[in-house]
Amino acid sequence: MSVKLIDAKQLSLLLPKLFERHDDIYVATAWGSNGTVADSLFEQAHKFRSVTFGLAFCQTDPDLVDRMVDVANSFVLLSEKGTFHPKLYYFSTEGEAEAIVGSSNFTNGGLGKNLEANMHIRGPVNAGVFKQIRKAIESFSKLQQPVTNELATTYRLQFDAAKKLKKPSDPALPGSSNKSRQLGSSLASMSWADYTASVRSGKFHNYSERLSILRECQRMIYSVSSFGDLAPNQWKAIAGVIGEQQKIEAGLDHHNWGWFGSMKGMGDFANRVSERDHHLAAALDSVPRHGEVGEDQYIEFCENFLLAFQKTQRKGSYPTATRLLAMKRPDVFVCVSKPNLAGISDGLGFAKSTLSLENYWERVIEPIRVSPWYNATRPNGADAELWDGRVAMLDAIYYNPD
């Protein structure tokens, strides 16, 4: 039995030799990167007995995951109880075995630039330490998941989105939850080019006039320090409840304010707007004017919004709430109401009957925020304004009055 301490660089030089030297390859690490060491690993894929990479926090390279599609005895792993965090490399040929146990993940850092410490162990295959290593690797089998094309595509989508988040979250794997089905939906996987084409080809409402409404709402909202400071008819226009005569009186008759969700039939909501209820103002004021909008801020909005309906027969719901949200932050929210509910629910892969104010963030906003069209870089030129209102403008794609 021999034991030697090696660093990251030494490990990167040793692993390709071990992949080639031995008949059986076992790997279990928290994260992996694609690269030259991965090339040498997959050249020996016929020797895989159990090769597993974790996906926690979306830190494994999606290019590496792509290479694992349909490769026998290669797996990904995501644990709901704690993070999958081992760094085990084990190799055997007949009666001999070698193992690397230490701090190095199968990543560019763990195999190169990081300061790592690993034990390289060589000896007979029946040595106690090798039995323990094999037992540890076998214990992961219940959580291992083979890599399919669907899994690789879904993971890449979330990896790309997670790069832009301050604190990346675990990905949802195909079949693991309702969220995973939504992430594979047509809208969540739509490209920016397909999005812009779909918005411009919408059957209902003029594209430029829709953008003009969003522009007017932004002008009104940002002209005051609080939503509560706006004039009564401005409240009504933004809320989608303004009447024809009121539009003329306020000089707002150049727009059809029913676009993006007419709320004229929502009597209790219209009354709260007419009274300029301070809870509604507080709700909208809780949503930042610029930058990131988090779920905590959405929850705060909902809490204030619902307070406005404490003494009414009917409570505020997602159509009226999301109308206000979409007009303040059209880059984050879409108004979901009866004419577009079927289209949006189908596009995002959830049953339309299940949507509520409580789960709107989960069902609508979360899958949108990982989609390629949402995460596209803000373009120059004519599409810049569309990008600024890209979520609210989903109504142009999915609106159907039938």
Image (cartoon, helix red, strand yellow):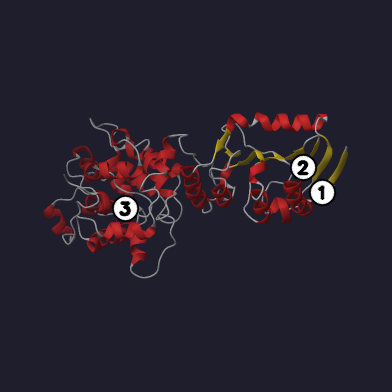
Q: Earlier in the sequence, mark 2 or mark 3?
A: 2
Above or below for 105 versus 176: below
The residues bearing labels 1 and 3 have C-alpha atoms spaced at a distance of 55 Å
Residue at point 86%, 44% (across, down):
4
- Mark 1 vs mark 3, foreground winner is 1
Q: Quadrant of residue 128?
A: top right
Above or below for 358 versus 168: above
Report whether 339 appears left or right of 177: left
The residues bearing labels 2 and 1 have C-alpha atoms spaced at a distance of 9 Å
Mark carried by residue 6: 1
Residue sitting nearer the eye, 13 or 292: 13
Report whether 17 appears left or right of 78: right
Q: Amino acid at mark 3?
A: Ala
Q: Position of residue 310 (x, y in %)?
A: 30, 32
Q: Secondary structure at mark 3?
A: loop
Residue sitting nearer the eye, 51 or 301: 51
Mark carried by residue 51: none
Q: Quadrant of residue 55?
A: top right
Q: Position of residue 7 (x, y in %)?
A: 79, 50
Q: Amino acid at mark 1?
A: Ile
Question: Which residue is denoted by mark 3 in the rendering?
Answer: 392
Mark 2 and mark 1 in contact? Answer it, CB < 8 Å.
yes
Q: Secondary structure at mark 2?
A: strand
Q: Secondary structure at mark 1?
A: strand
Mark carried by residue 100: 2
Residue at point 46%, 42% (across, down):
296
Label 1 CA crowd tier, 10 Å (few <14, some 14–19, many 20+): some
Q: Earlier in the sequence, mark 1 or mark 3?
A: 1
Residue at point 75%, 43% (across, down):
22
Q: Amino acid at mark 2?
A: Ile
Q: Earlier in the sequence, mark 2 or mark 1?
A: 1
Report whether 73 appears left or right of 187: right
